[in-house]
Image (cartoon, coloured by chain):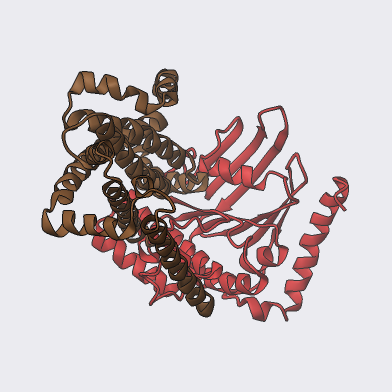
Chain colours: A red, B brown
Amino acid sequence: MSTITVRNVTHVFPGGVLAVSDATIEIRAGEFVSIVGPSGCGKTTVLNLVAGLVDLQQGKIDVAGKPPRAGRGDVAYMLARDCLFPWRTALANVMLGGEYRGVPKSDREARARLFLNKVGLSGFEHSYPKALSHGMRQRVALARTFSLHSPVLLMDEPFGALDAQTKLQLEDVLLDLWTAEQRTVAFITHDLNEAVTLSDRVIVMSARPGRILADIPIDLPRPRSVRALQKDARYHEIYAEVWSWLEQSLLQAHMI
Amino acid sequence: MKRQGIIIGVLQVVTLVAFFMLWEWAAVARAVDPIFIGQPTRIFDFLYESIFVTGSLFKDTAWTLGETAVAFVLGSATGIAFGLLFVVWPPVERFFNPLFAGLNALPRIALAPLFLLWFGLGAPSKIALGFSLTFFIVLSSTVAGARSVDPDWLILSRMLGASRAAMFWKVTLVSAVPTIFSGLRLGLIYALLGVIGGEIIAGRHGLGQQLTYLAGTFNTNGVFAVLFFLSILGVTLTWVMGGIENYLLRWR
């Protein structure tokens, strides 16, 4: 059974711009699925519809058997920016979700410390964001997302603003966390390497209006290592396949 | 950089000493009549006497500071409360906006005679004048601060399950604090300005009233002494506010 079902969803922006056209996506429990596509193709709109941040106009969406609603306890959301509150320490930032959800202080603190440790930031619990690098801040954001008990994670280009080297490190951290926790992940990215490295499947969307062009299974064995995959022939084959679909979409839209 | 700092410091002291020496000379040599410019050594004598011998300056300072504190606390609290109300319920802002715009456009000192009529010669009329200045400054900084909250913080909070009240108290309000503090720092100086202005126009106590009395008796040295003291007081108040701000906003 799918944890996330997006069926025949069409979305029109105010002003009449057709953003998403008849999109259907199924994500099974514990699956890591990336959605890629040209800039402005409606990837984030689909994610925001699933998150309940944007009202559904046409079609049907189910998240764990229920219609989407922002603020559900079983769904966590991660934005491209780390969105850390500068007035809170790293620990207090990770504890934020638990605080909003009424988790007892001792529980949420223990969990926050555990996940800060998992993302390699033990010792930085009492640092304010201004004292952390971009990569460290995004690690805190990862810890904040994973420290919640939410089985569904929606991630909107979480490493999009990082430099290449930091991004590779963070992808490894995410792979480790996901392998240990096996959450259901919908991951938006424009980076094909990232999509192939992390995912069980990659969904390619067309240029606007966003339609689903391809659903490509990534049959690379797990656990994966970002660096080891760079030398894997199968990885490059899959990358070429995903790229050919994306290239087709870009050509159709006269973007290349 | 450090060397540059030392040079600037030395130059500042030298300029200040030269200025006072020139001033002293102009007064002693009667290049300018001391009735207009006073005399630095006499100004210092006046300050010394009214601080360490009679203590009269302290009494007036206590009045002025007390009135300033009340005007500042009331003006800031009301300004913040109205500012937050405006952000939470924009129709309230639309209702009050024309009234507040009109009141804020008034030269506040022009209200002093009315405040004297309503509240008498004592402290309340000075507090009202200080309040009328502080209120609008803190109000506009609160509205500006609360409106400039990062929308991504609100999206994140919403997704994390925050209630509307939690988003307001834990995100909107906290993120507005630095801007509110800029308003508070300015509001404190304007509260002092309003109170002194009120005391100058009519009063029984305070540094403003003391200034009027000294000027009226042609005691120029006394006037300059009180002005120096006021300047030091203003700088100290700003410095204390800056210290509180730096401590509370140490995360910046």
Quadrant including the N terminus of chain B = bottom right
Residue A101 at least partly seen: no
Q: How many marks?
A: 0
Residue B184 at least partly seen: yes
- Measuring from the top left, give residue A17's x and y in whole percent: 73, 32
Q: Quadrant of residue A90?
A: bottom left
Residue at 35% of width from left, 30% of height from top? B85
Residue at 58% of width from left, 59% of height from top? A158
Q: Quadrant of residue B127?
A: top left
**Relative height, residue A111 to residue A11 (above, below):** below
**Relative height, residue A29 to residue B91 (above, below):** below
- Measuring from the top left, give residue A214's x and y in whole percent: 74, 52
**Relative height, residue B46 to residue A111 (above, below):** above
Q: Nearer the viewer, residue B238 or A180?
A: B238
Question: In the image, A148: left or right of A198?
Answer: left
Residue at 39% of width from left, 53% of height from top? B30
Residue at 33% of width from left, 65% of height from top? A111
Quadrant including the C terminus of chain B = bottom left
Q: Nearer the viewer, residue B3 or B12?
A: B12
- Measuring from the top left, give residue A255's x and y in whole percent: 85, 50
- Measuring from the top left, give residue A103's x and y in whole percent: 28, 54
Question: In the image, A231: left or right of A109?
Answer: right
**Relative height, residue A70 to residue A251 (above, below):** above
